[in-house]
Image (cartoon, rainbow, N blue to C red):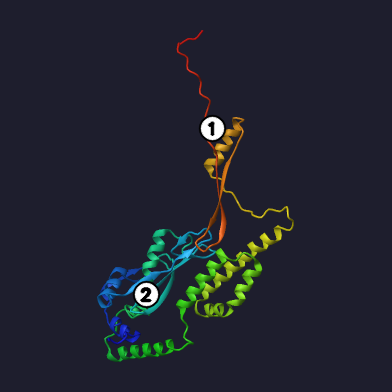
Amino acid sequence: MADKLTYKEVWETLSKVDCSEHIEKKMNLSYLSWAWAFGTLMEHYADATFEFGAFTTAEDAMHDAMFYPDGSASVFVTVDIQGLKRSMWLPVMDNRNNAISNPSSRQISDAKMRCLVKCIALFGLGHYIYAGEDLPSSDKETTVKKVEEVEEVEEVEDKETKADTSESVLFNEAFIKFLEMNADTVKNLESYFVENKSNMAKLKKELPDLYTGLIKLCAEKKQQLIKAENYKKQPKHPDHTGKIELSKTMLKALVERAKKNQDITISMAMWDRQSKEGKNYKYVSIELPEIKEPEVEAFEDEIPF
C-alpha cells in the first residue's frame, strides 16, 4: 500500500516549479495564468479536484458569489489533492484591486479563476508571487528554509488549536442560509447567535471581513423582524405583508386605460411553495389583462345609405 501523500511532499514538488515565464503583469500587479497553473497541477497530481462555493438567496436562487450589504462580493474555492485540502477566498476586484459593487457575471467568473490560482499557490505553485518575489530562489539554503517552515506549519495544523479557515467559511455560509430561510423571529435569531458564539469568535479571528459582513446581515435581519413583529398587534392585522413592483410597461398601460376612462382590473395569482430547505412561502404573480377593442361589423356595400 502506497504511503499517504503529505502537505510537505506536495509543497516540495510544486514550490520548485519556475513560474516566471507565465506571469502576467497588470497595473504593476503580478498574475499567474490560471490555465497554466491548473495544467501544471494536473501534470503532477492528475486526480486533484476543486470546488467553488455556492450560495442560496431568500428567493431560493443560487449564486456563485457571496454578496455583502454594500453590493460587493467574494468568491470561495477549495482544492483537494488526494484528500489534502486548502481553501481560499477572494473579493471580486477591478484591475486596481478595489472591490467592485454589483459585479457582472464576467467579473465574478474572472475572480473565481484568480481565486483558484491563489488556492493552488497555498500548495506551493507560484507561492513566491504573492510574497512579492520576482523569481524562485535556486539557493539550497532558501529551499531548505521553506521546507522547514512548511513542516512547522503542518505540525501546527495537526493540532486542534490550528485555525481551519475552511470550517469558518462553511460556518459563515450556514449562518447566512439560516438568516435567509429560518430566522423568523428576533428570539430565534438571537438564540442561534448565542448558540454559535464560539464559531462567531473563530470567524472573527480568522476571517474578520466575513465576520463584519455577517454582523451587518444579522443587524439588518433583526430590524426586519422587529418591524414584522411589531406590526401584527391585533387579530385584524394581516398575516403577510410585502411589496408589489410595477414595471414601466404596466404603469404606462394603466395610464393609457385611465385616459380612455376604462375600468382597470389587475389579475393576480398566488401559489403555496416550498423551498429546497423545506420552508413554506407564498409566490404571487400579477398581470394586466389585455382589453380587446370591439370589432366593427363590416358592411357588404361600400356606401350603406
Q: What element carries label 1?
A: loop
Extreme residue toward the top, this view: 305
The residue at which mark 1 appears reads as 291
From what the image shows, is residue 256 above or below residue 145?
Answer: above
Percent of width and height locating residue 134? 31, 78
Q: Earlier in the sequence, mark 1 or mark 2?
A: 2
Q: What is the CA distance from the residue labelled 1 to the residue labelled 2?
A: 58 Å
Task: Look at label 1 and name its amino acid.
Answer: Ile
Task: Look at label 2 and name its amino acid.
Answer: Val
Percent of width and height locating residue 271? 55, 50
- Residue drawn at (55%, 64%), measured in percent from left and top? 181
Q: Quadrant of residue 90?
A: bottom left
Percent of width and height locating residue 245? 57, 48
Judge the density around disc 2: few (<14), some (14-19), many (≥20) Cα neighbours within 10 Å.
many
- Residue drawn at (27%, 89%), measured in percent from left and top? 139
Percent of width and height locating residue 147? 33, 89
- Residue drawn at (50%, 76%), measured in percent from left and top? 207
The residue at which mark 2 appears reads as 79
Q: Is mark 2 on a helix, strand or loop?
A: strand
